[in-house]
Image (spheres, rainbow, N blue to C red):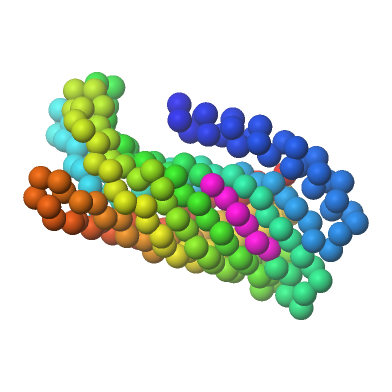
Amino acid sequence: MKIRLVAAALVAALAPVLSHAQDAASTSPVSVHPMLGFMGTFGGDKLVDVLYTDGTTSAVTAGGTVYLYGGAELRTTSLPLPLSVKATVGYHVGSAGGSNGDYRFERIPFELLGEVDVIPNRLRLGGGLRYDTGVNLSSHGVVAAPATKFKDAAGGVFQAEWMLGNNFSIVGRYVGIRYRFDDSGTGKQYHANGNQGGIGINWYL
């Protein structure tokens, strides 16, 4: 449900930007392209193990699992190498459980990325910064307990993007990030490695 709400909000917010970008694209060396993306991610420390009644297990990790985002990209062709800059905000969640209860690791990432065309109109390489807010591990249903709230975290991104025409691309990436929280019961600070790989798609409007 949260993913659907975020997607609807992003589309509504980007609609006026799309109209302006289409008008400006034909007259300026710098073009603006609203974008949406979806990515599957993997990696990071294990935060929770879930044991099912059939004996199978599942885990919530600090690097998984579904990342949905949107924002805008600036493209220019006036430099020696074509350059693009992306600014996005998204919703990243990893979950495990069943119909009677589950665990979720949620965060709201902000990213600022730059890429250059190493193969014109085809392969882009680049990276940038990521800042995660609203980071928390929560439980629901029969396993409900107070949420563990992590501190906001900053990290780095390396990304490769293979363009499939002007509107779609396949993305592969690596994110280096670390989360931490304070245990009020013991007064100690704990860390979770959120380093992750990801594969997904970008859609440029």
User: Total of numbered circles in the picture?
Assistant: 0
| Image position, residue 61 (x, y; %) | 29, 48
The residue at 42%/51% (across/down) is: 132
Magenta-drawn segment: 84-89
| Image position, residue 177 (x, y; %) | 37, 61
In the image, is residue 87 above or below residue 58? below
Q: Quadrant of residue 12?
A: top right
Say left or right for 134 vs 102: right
In reply to whether residue 199 is colored magenta, the answer given is: no
Say left or right for 7 vs 194: right
Regarding residue 65, the answer to whether it shows in the image is no
The residue at 23%/47% (across/down) is: 47
Say left or right for 159 vs 156: right
Q: Nearer the viewer, residue 135 or 59?
A: 135
In the image, is residue 136 above or below residue 180? above
| Image position, residue 127 (x, y; %) | 54, 66
In the image, is residue 164 above or below residue 114? above
| Image position, residue 149 (x, y; %) | 28, 43
Q: Main secondary structure of the magenta part?
A: strand
Q: Nearer the viewer, residue 187 or 23?
A: 187
The residue at 12%/52% (across/down) is: 187
Say left or right for 94 vs 116: left
Which image quarter holds the C terminus?
Answer: top right
Q: Quadrant of residue 104?
A: top left
Q: Nearer the viewer, residue 154 or 143?
A: 154
- Residue found at the far right of this picture: 27
- Residue found at the far left of this picture: 186
Regarding residue 78, the answer to whether it shows in the image is yes
The residue at 45%/26% (across/down) is: 1
